[in-house]
Image: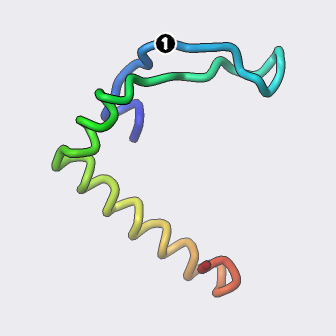
Amino acid sequence: MIAELLGPPDTTECNPGGRNAPRVKLFDRIRVEGTEGTDLFHRRFAQAQVRRAAQRHGAGQELAR
């Protein structure tokens, strides 16, 4: 969803997780907040919530928190 809505990152930095870890992708906050206000974002977010709920239901109640 991130790649679809935001496209390429504005910059990347070294990953503090280790020398061989992939670089951290950083996005401009104003661009992210602008994307969060779009109809496409709200539709995709709602779809993700439905999938997440279905996965939790299928896995059992212990993961439903």
How far across and down, in percent of the image, does residue 38 sit?
18, 44
**Image side of residue 41 versus residue 14, left or right:** left
Q: Residue furthest front?
A: 30
Q: Residue furthest bottom?
A: 61
Disc 1 crowd, CA 10 A, few/some/many (<14, 14-19, 20+):
few
Depth check, front residue: 43 or 12: 12
Q: Quadrant of the C terminus?
A: bottom right
Report the amino acid beneath label 1: Thr
34 over 26 or under it: above or below: below
Q: Residue furthest left?
A: 39
**Image side of residue 6 versus residue 37, left or right:** right
| Total tally of numbered discs in the picture | 1
14 over 65 or under it: above or below: above
Render colour scheme: rainbow
Which image quadrant is residue 57 in? bottom right
Depth check, front residue: 53 or 38: 38
Tell me the residue at 39%/70% (across/down). Answer: 50
Tell me the residue at 37%/29% (across/down). Answer: 29
Tell me the residue at 39%/41% (across/down). Answer: 1
How far across and down, in percent of the image, does residue 62 sit?
70, 83
**Image side of residue 25 versus residue 2, left or right:** right
58 over 2 or under it: above or below: below
Which image quadrant is residue 55 in? bottom right
Tell me the residue at 21%/45% (across/down). Answer: 37
**Image side of residue 19 versus residue 45, left or right:** right
How far across and down, in percent of the image, does residue 18 sit?
83, 21
Residue corresponding to mark 1:
11
Q: Secondary structure at mark 1?
A: strand
